[in-house]
Amino acid sequence: MRTHLLPIALVALVALTTAACSDDDGDTNQNNNTTSDCGDGVASGAETCDGADHRLDDCSTIGMNFTGGTLACNATCDGWVTTGCTTNDDCGNNTLDAGELCDGSLLDGNDCESIAGGFLGGALACNATCDGWVTTGCTSVDDCGNDALDSGETCDGSLLDNNECSTIGGIFTAGDLACNATCDGWVTTACTAGGDSCSDPLVVTGDASFVGTDITADFTDQLDLQDASCDGGYGVPAAGAVEAVFEVALAAGEKMIVAESGGLDGYLMVTSTCDSSAVCAAVSDTPDELSYTATAAETVYVIVGAYVATPSSTDYAIEFSFPVCGNGIVETGEQCDDVNGTPASGDGCSDTCEIEFGYECDNTSTSVCALYPAFGTFNGDCESNIQQTGGALATGDAEFFLLTLTASAIVTGTVSSPDGDMEFYIVNDGGQAYSFETAGDEIVTASLGAGTYALVAYAYDAVSSFSIDLATECPEDLGSLGDGGAVNQVEAAMAAGELYYYKITLTEDVMMNGTLTSTSGDADFYIYGAQGFVTGHFEDGNEIINTVLGAGTYYLQVNAYMALPDFTLNLAFTTPSIPDIGTFAAGDAIGDQVGGALAQQVCAHYTITFTNDVLLSGTLGGNATGDVDLYLYNADRNYVESAANGSETWTDQPVSAGTYYLQVQAYGDVVDAYTLTLATTTP
């Protein structure tokens, strides 16, 4: 919001300066800008105003771009006090700015009964200039009780404006609704509530909201869902916690959004059956919003409840919405909606009303989508000066660009700003990202396969401008190798921080064994897959390399951690022999893998296959000496997850069905033994 502080400050400064100046004629008893009558409440002579007498002026007529508010006269009767005035920029922003009586829905604690006018109740509103009230919705004593629906009344006596218990937006399903004594609300003591159990669910047939102050009083059922699928991320809800039960009939392809926005620490669940042993088809704990789309026509039960038996806050506000993708209206749960009728993909807004990769869409109805600006298209063959500059960005703002590579490449460079901290991300169409998030300029190194990528320049601090300077490296090609192949490369000096690249194509799955050594200094060794993600790294003095790689193209990076007078890379490739842990479905027991001693930086490898999507948890321990690290790679040897910081464990890592590779690496010391424990649950 932009406020007009500068003009007000200048006016105050001028008034102060004028009031301090005396007459030129030497008369010390009189100031030119005041009169002896100032303070008598009557604007006379040279006075601009006097007390409440403003000579018919108000905030909007004094030529200072104000549109409303309360104008006051200064103490010397020669100018205005405008702190109570408002501008168009202020009024309407739903914030109570200086000088505003109200703004939009913010009434500063006022209602029809609290303001002057003798109103009994009704709906008070703020006027268009934020300096007064709209009382057409208020009711007076004379109106309420006359058995007529007067302006501002919700009801009057027996006249309920066609409302009944089931239509007033609460938890009530039947009974006798009554009007309160002030004609502005309901008496629901004779209404009966639903949703308290599976035998009496609240039936939701369209957009609806259910609001209350005490969920433990309105819903006393304790369904106690205990299936592991109902774990909201922090375990299943506590026994004895109350739940509200809703029944919803969904058509095939229909999407439902359920949100709980009250103070309640709650959870949301969708099940196809309603009993304590129900399996959850969807669950949300944080944030308290859940999206569910029916694959076929079905009736589901939505369970909304407290997470603990005695919640600290019992306020609840449960909202159901059913967005229709393709109606040209951006509804709750939709990122965009750009087509009337049958939605389509490939135009920026998908057929499920989600923004497609490489596009940005506004939030209007109908949405307007456009591709990110093109950074360029490159073939990956030693191209330099891939550059893009940008202007000012506020803190937290970002600029997006599209980079297309027609062949795999190592992309390096910098992202910089003269006066702030930029962060940089490279994201593929699957949502996988390289992130560069250091203080100051970002040093970029990324192995990217052929394809299109989103480049994101993010302003961690406000910047006046920024520059993205990238290049594709020219790796030395080691050719194609398989079982029995070998590499022996001796290279010259490298400065600290300098990088050297090799490209290698493996014709079959191999075990890569070898060393990276230097007569002095420290060189680190990294392996990048052609699809862009690290598949191995070795970084502790002279590097002992021991890892399994699948057939395909890789980039080998030598990083001079310290200045090197030279370095030698020796590699040998053999057919791997990898123990297979087995094939498992979610929840199946997986036996521990117990291994013996591992020399420094040496790895042990395993394969494992999952028949369905799982949440994978793992721990690596059992070693009395040495630091052992754990890595998980997919079938393409792309990195998935690691535990490499002392306490080697991960919990509930989402893993899709397929075959994976596990690598156990002795990081910096000889490891005497290890035990690998794995477990899975259903996502």
Image (spheres, helix red, strand yellow):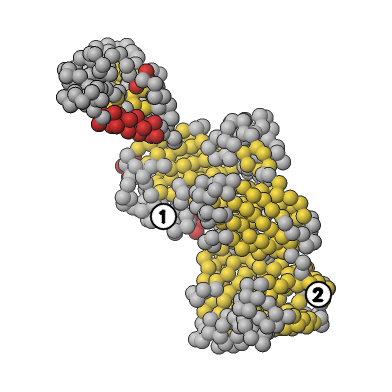
Viewer-nearest of discs 1 and 2: 2
Does the CB distance between marks 1 and 2 fall below 8 Å? no
Q: Along the horizontal axis of the image, is 311 left or right of 466? A: left
The residue closer to the viewer here, 410 or 367, is: 410
Q: Quadrant of residue 547?
A: bottom right
Quadrant in which residue 425 is drawn: bottom right
In the image, is 20 to the left or to the right of 276?
left
Residue 383, labelled with which disc?
none
Which residue type does callout 2 highlight? Leu
Q: State whether residue 215 is above or below residue 129.
A: below
Secondary structure of the residue carrying tag 2 is: strand
Viewer-side residue, 605 vs 322: 605
Residue 514 vs residue 248, the one in the foreground = 514
Residue 541 sits in quarter = bottom right
- Tell me: 59 left or right of 633: left
Three-letter amino acid code at disc 1?
A: Pro
Pinpoint residue 435: horizontal percent, then vertical percent: 59, 59
Q: Which residue sits at x=29%, y=32%?
A: 17
Which of the marked residues, 1 or 2, is nearer the chain's N terminus?
1
Res 621 visible = yes
Locate residue 35, reporting x and y percent. 20, 19
- Residue tagged 1: 237
The residue lying at 58 percent from left, 69 percent from top is: 642
Residue 437 on image: x %, y %? 55, 60
Q: CA distance from mark 1 to mark 2?
A: 57 Å
Q: Nearer the viewer, residue 248 or 180?
A: 180
**Tag 1 secondary structure:** loop
What residue is pinned by disc 2?
478
Q: From what the image shows, is residue 231 above or below residue 123?
A: below
Residue that appears at 23% across and 23% down: 25
Name the residue at the front extreme: 25
Above or below, 278 relative to 643: above
